[in-house]
């Protein structure tokens, strides 16, 4: 169905694709695997007509095609479902599916009746049990992805590219998506599937192509490979100590939260975290974990409760005075909440400590460079230069920049909200090692994560939340996925045993 041969793509200072090849069969799910920065997104954008290849050939059904823009890609039957969905929330499902391509009647106005009929057929095809006139803002992320798939099918897409489609989905929503993928396979649609979650690849894909540093490495049949081989091919080395955690006896209590309440969101939440401890927060999407951390930092107001840092009641915090007390957070969404993507690595790394090198209109360049160089070296940030725009870095390196920005302020308590979401295995391993180093220095770490493997392997204790309450607490010796999920699925008003 699709045959990519010898594709090259250069950007200033970067060889993004170097002689890359890929082929896709009808009715196949073909994974594209590699570290952030391996060239996966560039290849996707070449196939989608967002970038033009500098050299190479692309064949559809054996015939060579030229993809110079998005329209060319659509004519070739290619459609991309991006990780960040691009739907208009206040329009209906039907209006989103046919946006810019609305069917017209004899007098040239939009034929809404036909548009809704055609949209209804499409959304039923992908298994979405909704009316076509439903506003998109009322849909869950998983349902919005189904709308994106329906939109792709409306373009007669035979080749569907899915970029990290499950990064924001619950387990139930992932299974619904997989059912749709299997249905599309039966219809002969070829799917290129990009994900860092190994378990998904073994469940849904037929073959896996591995890329590294912009180059094609190998293609493996999924049923003939394993995680260790794929990791080795991705990073070029074995990750023997994937989870780095040297457990130590925690020190004194650095943060104590008592009876935090926020109407309809948080209910009598209390906990402590100690010096050198990694405290995990587990739970399903919507359990209230991120809302709790935002309340503690003063980003969201709460109705009642107390917060004490090193034994002193600090009252209602704000983002600024939380940092003064040594309390900082790396947010869940690095692109929207953590970084200024159009500015440089240097600019982002120093945002939290401007006072250390700026006095009035005078800038101490030596101090600024010292902060930047320390952050890049300590966190092993891969960047051609401190002046590189942070938006041009891989996801893993962007995440390291966010962490570095807050570490520059020398915090005592560090909150990490989904620190490895959308990050490849090599960068994950680096982040785990960084967390262990910080704990060894006596920093108290609170980690929110939906990946139970990293909760179990990295944390000293785990608190599980459901319906805005802490429903269970486990120490390391008692960790298990079953126990954690038992607490996470506690019915509101009940207490898990």
Image: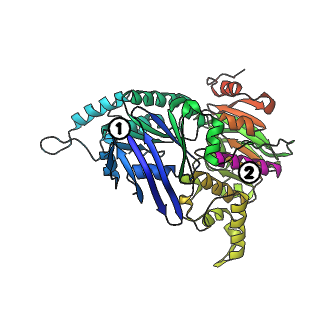
Q: Give percent across and percent down for residue 216.
A: 53, 49
- Residue 424 position (above or below residue 323): above
Q: Which residue is mark 1?
A: 158
Provide the major secondary structure of the magenta segment: helix
- Of helix, strand and loop, which one carries label 1? loop
Q: Give percent across and percent down for residue 402.
A: 64, 55
The quarter of the rendered structure image containing the N terminus is top left
How many marks overall?
Answer: 2
| Residue toward you, 56 or 104 | 56
Indicate the quadrant where residue 108 lies.
Answer: top left
Q: CA distance from mark 1 to mark 2?
A: 43 Å
| Residue toward you, 272 or 232 | 232
Q: Is residue 138 at all visible to an observer of this figure?
A: no
Which segment is the magenta one? 425-441
Report the side of 391 relative to 292 (left or right). left
Report the side of 47 relative to 323 (left or right). left
Q: Which mark is residue 434?
A: 2
Residue lying farthest bottom?
362
Residue lying farthest left?
106
- Residue 68 position (above or below residue 100): below
Task: Give the residue drawn at x 72%, y 61%.
Answer: 377
Q: Give percent across and percent down for residue 188.
A: 37, 31
User: How are the residues colored?
Assistant: rainbow
Examine the structure image and report whether residue 96 is included in the region drawn in magenta.
no
First in sequence: mark 1 vs mark 2 = 1
- Of helix, strand and loop, which one carries label 2? helix
Q: Give percent across and percent down for residue 422.
A: 57, 45
């Amino acid at each position: 169905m699709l045959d990519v041969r010898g594709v090259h793509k250069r950007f200033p200072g970067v060889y993004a694709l170097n002689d890359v090849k890929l082929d896709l069969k009808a009715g196949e799910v073909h994974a594209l695997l590699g570290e952030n920065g391996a060239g996966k997104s560039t290849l996707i954008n070449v196939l989608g007509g967002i970038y033009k290849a500098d050299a190479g050939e692309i064949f559809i059904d054996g015939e060579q095609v030229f993809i110079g823009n998005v329209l060319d890609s659509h004519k070739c039957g290619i459609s991309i479902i991006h990780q960040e969905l691009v739907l208009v929330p206040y329009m209906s499902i039907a209006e989103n599916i046919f946006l810019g391509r609305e069917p017209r009647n004899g007098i040239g106005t939009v034929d809404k009746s036909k548009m809704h009929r055609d949209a209804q057929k499409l959304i039923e095809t992908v298994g979405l049990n909704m009316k076509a006139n439903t506003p998109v803002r009322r849909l869950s992320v998983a349902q919005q992805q189904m709308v994106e798939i329906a939109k792709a099918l409306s373009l007669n897409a035979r080749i569907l590219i899915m970029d990290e489609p499950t990064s924001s989905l619950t387990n139930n929503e992932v299974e619904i998506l997989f059912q749709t993928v299997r249905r599309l396979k039966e219809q002969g649609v070829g799917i290129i599937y990009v994900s860092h979650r190994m378990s998904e690849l073994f469940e849904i894909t037929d073959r896996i192509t591995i890329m590294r540093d912009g180059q094609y490495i190998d293609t493996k049949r999924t049923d003939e490979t394993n995680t260790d081989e794929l990791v080795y091919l991705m990073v070029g080395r074995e990750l023997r100590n994937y989870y780095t955690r040297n457990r130590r006896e925690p020190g004194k209590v650095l943060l104590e939260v008592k009876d935090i309440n926020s109407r309809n969101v948080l209910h009598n939440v209390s906990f402590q975290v100690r010096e050198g401890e990694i405290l995990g927060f587990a739970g399903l999407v919507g359990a209230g974990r991120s809302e709790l951390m935002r309340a503690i930092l003063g980003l969201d107001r709460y109705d009642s409760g107390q917060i004490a840092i090193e034994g002193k009641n600090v009252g209602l915090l704000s983002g600024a005075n939380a940092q003064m007390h040594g309390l900082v957070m790396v947010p869940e969404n690095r692109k929207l909440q953590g970084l200024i993507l159009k500015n440089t690595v240097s600019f982002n790394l120093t945002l939290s400590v401007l006072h250390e090198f700026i006095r009035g209109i005078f800038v101490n360049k030596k101090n600024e460079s010292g902060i930047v160089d320390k952050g890049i070296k300590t966190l092993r940030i891969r960047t051609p230069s401190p002046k590189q725009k942070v938006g041009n870095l891989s996801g893993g390196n962007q995440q390291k920049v966010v962490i570095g920005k807050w570490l520059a302020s020398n915090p005592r308590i560090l909150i990490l909200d989904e620190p490895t979401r959308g990050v490849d295995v090599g960068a994950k391993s680096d982040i785990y090692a960084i967390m262990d180093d910080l704990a060894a220095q006596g920093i108290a770490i609170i980690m929110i994560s939906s990946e139970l493997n990293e909760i179990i392997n990295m944390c000293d204790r785990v608190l599980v939340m459901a319906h805005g309450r802490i429903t269970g607490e486990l120490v390391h010796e008692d960790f298990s996925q079953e126990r954690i999920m038992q607490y996470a699925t506690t019915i509101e008003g009940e207490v898990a045993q």
